[in-house]
Image (cartoon, rainbow, N blue to C red):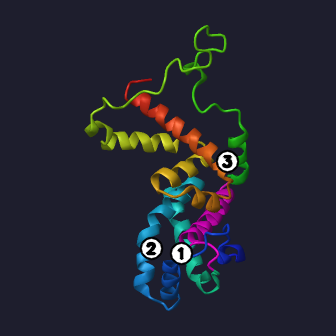
Amino acid sequence: MATTEHEIQGIAPAGSSASAADLHLLAALRSGDEAAFTSLLEQHHASLVRLAAIYVSSRAVAEEVAQETWIGVLQGLDRFEGRSSLKTWIFRILTNRAKTRGQREARSVPFSDLAAAEIEADEPAVDPSRFNPPDDPAWPGHWAVGPQSWDQIPEQQFLSQETKEQIMAAIASLPPSQREVITLRDIEGWSSAEICTVLDLSEANQRVLLHRARSKVRRALELYFGEG
């Protein structure tokens, strides 16, 4: 698949252009420095695969999309204008290709439409049954069953592999756009600005999706720890 002009230019909001370090790395890549490309590959490949897996049907296909992305990166290096960070540019190529591949696999609804549907859905972030009814005589609308404190949970249990697996399973069960946002924000450690740029989301919509995703993951952990 050819690298599109949109991908090559590195479209991004003002103020998020390539840094001096990006430009230095870009010069090395353009000169054919294999060590620079290997370093870039080691830094981002696993994350590319994880993000691609949100859009496509299997891990194997996600790997293929990541490989296609690296080919696109190499093809576009000479024409990359630096209007975004190098990282953002690479992940924009990945999301464009993963979305196209996912739609070819009969996922016919564009992800932009899915995101809009998730944001517009009348979906409470927290189960309404956890609040007092509006006619409660003392505390209408206040917490009936508030968020549980996890201070009493042993640190070893909280940080165990089993707990991590519960978190990943909860994330995997989320609607696609919520899964995208929480994966990038809480697993990959991206900033809100980076997420908005790569996923074409407004800051407000990114916050809505992230809040809903975190609330559902927290609820799943409450049930796992026997607090639900």
Which kind of residue does numbered mark 3 sit on? Asn
Look at 62% across and 19% down and name the residue there.
Answer: 141
Q: Earlier in the sequence, mark 3 or mark 1?
A: 1
Res 16 → quadrant: bottom right
Q: Tell me the number on the disc at residue 205.
A: 3
- What residue occupies the far bottom of the structure in this picture? 31
Which kind of residue does numbered mark 2 sit on? Leu
Q: In the picture shown, does residue 45 fall above or below 171? A: below
Quick check: 4 left or right of 35? right
State the image coordinates of residue 75 (x, y, percent, origin top left).
Answer: 60, 83
Q: Look at mark 1 in the image and give the residue it sits on.
A: 70
SS category of the residue bearing label 1? helix
Main SS of the magenta segment?
Answer: helix
State the image coordinates of residue 195 (x, y, percent, origin top left).
Answer: 59, 58
Asked if disc 3 and disc 2 are in contact, CB closer than 8 Å, the reply is no
Look at 40% across and 84% down and name the residue there.
Answer: 35
Q: Nearer the viewer, residue 157 or 52?
A: 157
Quick check: 79 left or right of 174? right
SS category of the residue bearing label 2? helix
Asked if disc 2 and disc 1 are in contact, CB closer than 8 Å, the reply is yes
SS category of the residue bearing label 3? helix
Q: Look at mark 2 in the image and give the residue it sits on.
A: 41
Over which residues does the magenta segment extend? 82-106
Tell me how far mark 3 sits from mark 2, CA to CA. 31 Å
Quick check: 143 left or right of 83? left
Packing grade of label 3 (10 A; few <14, some 14-19, many >=20) is: some
* Magenta span contains residue 98: yes
Q: In the picture shown, does residue 145 fall above or below 218? A: above
Q: Earlier in the sequence, mark 3 or mark 2?
A: 2
